[in-house]
Image (cartoon, rainbow, N blue to C red):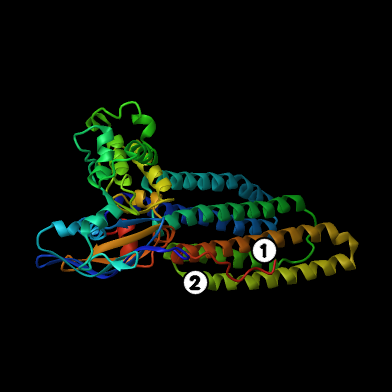
């Protein structure tokens, strides 16, 4: 027999909020990449502007968690859930900032001629967004196996990062005039690599929330 | 609990009231100089278990205990044990403050007097009142009636009364349920300082209190026939953040009760 119906309803609502915030951030990553690939400066500006809403959402969720802790004295898995939510929203907020970082690069590039057709960077963005999406599903479904699997997939991001890095270094070595443009693309790759690492942190929180054990799974190359 | 010495230990303790089995198969070690909290739903046998620790159940007609309660290595239910002696060494504080309708001084001096300790009585009383964090509030009214004290003061007086007998263990049965929040916090604070010299076992309905005050926590629950069993026992830090037993989890998160 469920006794703390009101409390648990509010706890589930917070988890819905996480999904909303997660989809905002996921969209920001994909949009910033769309803006980069297709030279959409306006879209980049929109990503930057909308980050304020991501930040607001984060404070809103944090406030709800503080209220629940102060008024409901959560215990055991409920406590771990709330603490994990507080961590997850911090990670999400940072991923939002990385999307902004990419959008800023798009604005910097402006209408400079493209260095090369972008293939690996969009792949990195899609993979990161996919990991983020599934990471949050794992969080909501309390799916430790899925969380561990997603952490492993960070190796793919690292491999793509290596590849992008090598390729851009080659450009720079061959033609000094590409240095500015290539460096900006390295920033983009770096933002995506960091984003994926934040996703692995979210996955570690899933493991903590379910098992109560704090462990670093995998560990990124970067 | 690691590296700590056992103060009390039960071994497959069972308690009956007539044909009704109140406790089944309770085996646990109560560490010395720590606070052990017993929690669980109403009627699960928390108070019954507490009363087993100083043979208070002996006073209930038809009660029967099997298994062992070891204190200082000896089974307190052995034939040659004097239950009165046990109750001096394992004192008890009850739910409602129950001072005698006597002066503050006489309340604390009661135990020592009964035991023929009439020397140094003033010193014994003062020390007990100090330890119970009550001295400063009553030192000028030692000869006034204990009934004039506030509820929180009365409860600390009862703790002082138990301390005057120099017990090793203090059993507390819902010691704060009749007190306001501030008096409650004061008792909890007192318990923490008392744990330096005594072993404390507390039964509480208030889970947050158990979480705040205890080192070890025991979760008791009822089986089908309403007998109390020990569902989980472990460090408080673990029991309230990551219980091992699903029944504990469900109880402390309010998913059953």
First of labels 2, 1 by sequence position: 2
Residue bearing the label numbered 1:
A193
Residue B127 placed where, x, y %?
38, 39
The answer to whether tags 2 and 1 share a subunit is yes
Quarter placement of the C terminus of chain B: bottom left
Residue reaching furthest to the front: B119
Judge left or right: residue B2 versus residue A189. Answer: left
Dot 2 and dot 1 residues touching (CB under 8 Å): no
Asked whether A194 or B197 is in front, the reply is: B197
- Which numbered marker is on residue A125? none
Q: Which chain carries label 2?
A: A
For residue A161, above or below residue B46: below
Q: How crowded is mark 1: few (under 14 residues within 10 Å), some or many (20 or more)?
A: many
Tell me, for residue A146, which label it has, or none.
2
The residue that appears at 70% across and 50% down in the rendered structure is A104
Furthest-top residue in view?
B140
Percent coordinates x, y for residue A155 in the rendering: 64, 73
Q: In this view, does B14 lie above or below A102?
A: below
Residue drawn at x 49%, y 47% is A62
Helix, strand or loop status at disc 2: helix
Neighbour tally class for label 2: few under 14, some 14-19, many 20 plus, Cα within 10 Å: some
Residue nearest the viewer, comparing A56 with A124: A56
Where is A217 relative to A186, above or below?
below
* Chain under numbered label 1: A
Q: Is residue B80 left or right of residue A69?
A: left
Residue B173 makes an appearance in the image: no
For numbered disc 1, what is the local secondary structure? Answer: helix
> What is the C-alpha distance between the residues marked 2 and 1?
20 Å
> Up-down: is A113 above or below A45?
below
Q: Kindly indicate the quadrant of the structure image that contains residue B140.
A: top left
Q: Where is residue B14 in the image (x, y as percent from the top left)?
A: 21, 69
């Amino acid at each position: 027999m469920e006794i703390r119906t009101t409390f648990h309803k509010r706890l589930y609502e917070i988890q819905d909020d996480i999904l909303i915030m997660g989809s905002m951030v996921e969209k920001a990553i994909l949009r910033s990449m769309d803006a980069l690939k297709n030279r959409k400066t306006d879209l980049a500006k929109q990503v930057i502007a909308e980050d304020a809403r991501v930040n607001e959402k984060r404070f809103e969720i944090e406030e709800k968690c503080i209220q629940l802790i102060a008024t409901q004295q959560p215990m055991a898995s409920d406590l771990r859930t709330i603490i994990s939510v507080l961590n997850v929203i911090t990670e999400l907020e940072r991923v939002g900032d990385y999307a902004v970082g990419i959008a800023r690069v798009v604005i910097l590039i402006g209408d400079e001629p493209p260095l090369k057709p972008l293939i690996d960077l969009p792949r990195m963005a899609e993979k990161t967004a996919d990991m983020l999406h599934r990471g949050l599903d794992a969080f909501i479904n309390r799916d430790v196996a899925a969380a561990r699997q997603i952490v492993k997939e960070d190796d793919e991001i690292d491999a793509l990062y290596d590849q992008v890095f090598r390729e851009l270094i080659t450009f720079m070595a061959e033609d000094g005039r590409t240095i500015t443009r290539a460096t900006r693309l390295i920033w983009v790759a770096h933002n995506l690599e960091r984003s994926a690492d934040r996703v692995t942190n979210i996955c570690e929180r899933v493991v903590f929330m379910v098992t109560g054990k704090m462990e670093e799974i995998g560990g990124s190359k970067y | 609990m690691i590296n700590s010495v056992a103060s009390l230990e039960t071994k497959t303790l069972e308690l009956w009231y007539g044909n009704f089995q109140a406790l089944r198969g309770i085996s646990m070690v109560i560490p010395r100089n720590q606070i052990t909290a017993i929690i669980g739903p109403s009627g699960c046998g928390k108070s019954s278990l507490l009363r087993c620790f100083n043979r208070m159940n002996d006073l209930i007609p038809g009660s029967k205990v099997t298994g062992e309660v070891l204190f200082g290595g000896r089974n307190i239910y052995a034939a040659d044990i004097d239950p009165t002696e046990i109750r001096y060494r394992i004192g008890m504080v009850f739910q409602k403050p129950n001072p005698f309708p006597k002066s503050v001084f006489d309340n604390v001096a009661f135990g020592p007097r009964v035991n023929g300790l009439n020397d140094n009585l003033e010193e014994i009383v003062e020390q007990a009142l100090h330890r119970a964090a009550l001295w400063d509030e009553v030192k000028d009214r030692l000869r006034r009636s204990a009934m004039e004290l506030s509820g929180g003061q009365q409860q600390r007086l009862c703790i002082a009364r138990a301390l005057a007998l120099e017990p090793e263990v203090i059993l507390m049965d819902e010691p704060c349920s009749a007190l306001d929040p501030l008096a409650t916090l004061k008792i909890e604070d007192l318990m923490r300082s008392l744990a330096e010299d005594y072993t404390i076992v507390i039964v509480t309905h208030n889970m947050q209190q158990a979480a705040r005050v205890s080192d070890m926590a025991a979760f008791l629950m009822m089986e089908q026939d309403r007998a109390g069993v020990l569902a989980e026992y472990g460090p408080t830090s673990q029991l309230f953040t990551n219980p091992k037993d699903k029944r504990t989890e469900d109880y402390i998160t309010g998913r059953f009760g």
